[in-house]
Amino acid sequence: MREVNFDGLIGPSHNYAGLSLGNLASARNAGGVSSPRAAALQGLAKMRRVMDMGLSQGFLLPHARPDADWLRTLGFAGSDDEVCEAAWKAEPALLRNAMSASAMWTANAGTVSPAPDCADGRCHISVANLSTMLHRSIEAPQTLRQLKLAFADSRHFAVHDALPGGLGDEGAANFMRLATAHGAPGLEVLVYGEQGRAEFPARQHKAASAAVARRHGLSEAGTLLVCQSDAAIAAGAFHNDVVAVANETVLFTHELAFEDRDGTYAAIRERLPSVQIVEAPAARISLDAAIRSYLFNSQLISLPEGGMALVLPGEVREVPEVWDWLQEIVAGNGPIRRLEVVEVRESMRNGGGPACLRLRVAVSDEALAAIDPRFLLDPAKADRMAQVIEAHWPERIAPEDLGDPALWRQCRTARTALLDTLGFASGEL
């Protein structure tokens, strides 16, 4: 089996509205001027970089924005432009939510359990409801349509609707899988937060994690529910993937990631004795430094030639204690042997690093062949996508631009051009 990373292509409405409570980068840059064209090209360049490293690469598409249909559910009527104009005049915050490009962070698209972990031998995917944040709660229906189209072959895949909104589910950003190899039965670690104990909301509910494990048919021995630390949430680690990431036998984590650190490590070691825990000590790397640099929001990947690499945001170089520690990790005799630094600054300014931008799906060669090829990337397709981005994505969006009908139309035109280029029929998505 191999791992395919499905990155979210950053949409033409990418802006800095600061909608995400608890996401410090999003809050710091709220009201700034965004660069959607540069953002999308940065994300596409990251996808190319991963392909160049020998991994298979997929993508998910920007959602329709502004989401006029969602605004209609709130009582606004008329054409798409009329609905958006009425919302902007009556409650601008609603239009800002309807314009959000946050679906680009596909780590929140859903939770993926590879076939070896599931009772029926299929890969199961549960769409996340993202119910804690209004702008993200809009995403589930469009995400479901894409995933059902991409993974339509029921011999290999089962795609589930989102859980009820009362159970906060943030998808793979609060999920880690450990295994001796991608194709071996794994230990799925679902990380949740305790509600009301930290200043910021705990977005993943324990009941949601347990429900996903049940619907995927995971075994008791192959499932571990772990509580995220209050300290991490309070420091701005709104998802577990801001303080921990796992790949095959390696858990790469901050010392303060989990509420019961020792108990969590012991439970993992009991289930997977070969696990290697690479821990950043709090005395060396503060939570603030880890979150500012998004050290752990990196892609930890297995290289075809052997060993593992970290795909890191360029910001890690700007935090000396983090960069110095990484040099020591790579120079040592540990499992992480290579650092690949990528430029995703536009995404980072809105609170999402390299790991936020991708959804990991481990598949056999037969299952890979069953995925809708329109969602799989190759160099020629990447070139065509870049041409569409250059031609149609806005160069900049200031806060006041969100109420401009010309911007709404440009966003619709840009997405339509992309879908046409990739061979999606009108109305298919």
Image: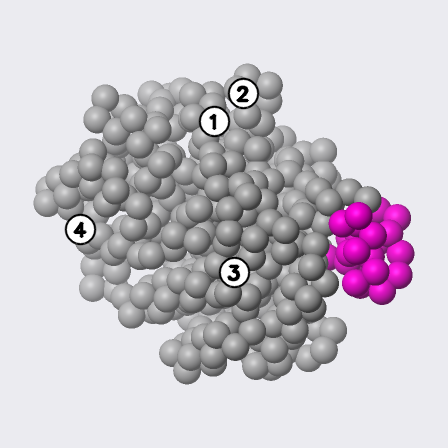
Going by the numbered disc 4, the residue's amino acid type is Arg
Give neighbour class at mark 4: few <14, some 14-19, many 20+ (Cα, 10 Å).
some
From where the camera sits, is residue 20 visible? yes
Quadrant showing the N terminus:
bottom left
Q: Secondary structure at mark 3?
A: loop
Residue indicated by mark 2: 199
For the point 60% across and 19% down, the residue is 196
Give neighbour class at mark 3: few <14, some 14-19, many 20+ (Cα, 10 Å).
some
Give the image location of residue 326, x and y in percent.
Answer: 19, 41
Which portion, as a residue range, is magenta? 67-89
* Badge 2 or badge 1: first in the primary sequence: 2
21 lies above or below 429: above
Q: Point out which mark residue 136 bears.
A: none
Going by the numbered disc 1, the residue's amino acid type is Ile
Q: Point out which mark residue 337 bears.
A: 4
Disc 2 + disc 4, Cβ < 8 Å: no
* Badge 2 or badge 4: first in the primary sequence: 2
- Image-based side of 259 in relation to 12, left or right: left
Disc 2 + disc 1, Cβ < 8 Å: yes
Cα distance, mark 3 to mark 4? 38 Å
* Badge 2 or badge 3: first in the primary sequence: 2
For the point 37% across and 66% down, the residue is 45
Going by the numbered disc 2, the residue's amino acid type is Glu
* Badge 1 or badge 4: first in the primary sequence: 1
Quadrant showing the C terminus:
bottom right
Front-lying residue, 369 or 373 = 373
Main SS of residues in magenta: helix
Disc 3 + disc 4, Cβ < 8 Å: no
Residue indicated by mark 3: 396
Mark 2 or 4: in front is: 2
Residue indicated by mark 1: 233
Give neighbour class at mark 2: few <14, some 14-19, many 20+ (Cα, 10 Å).
some
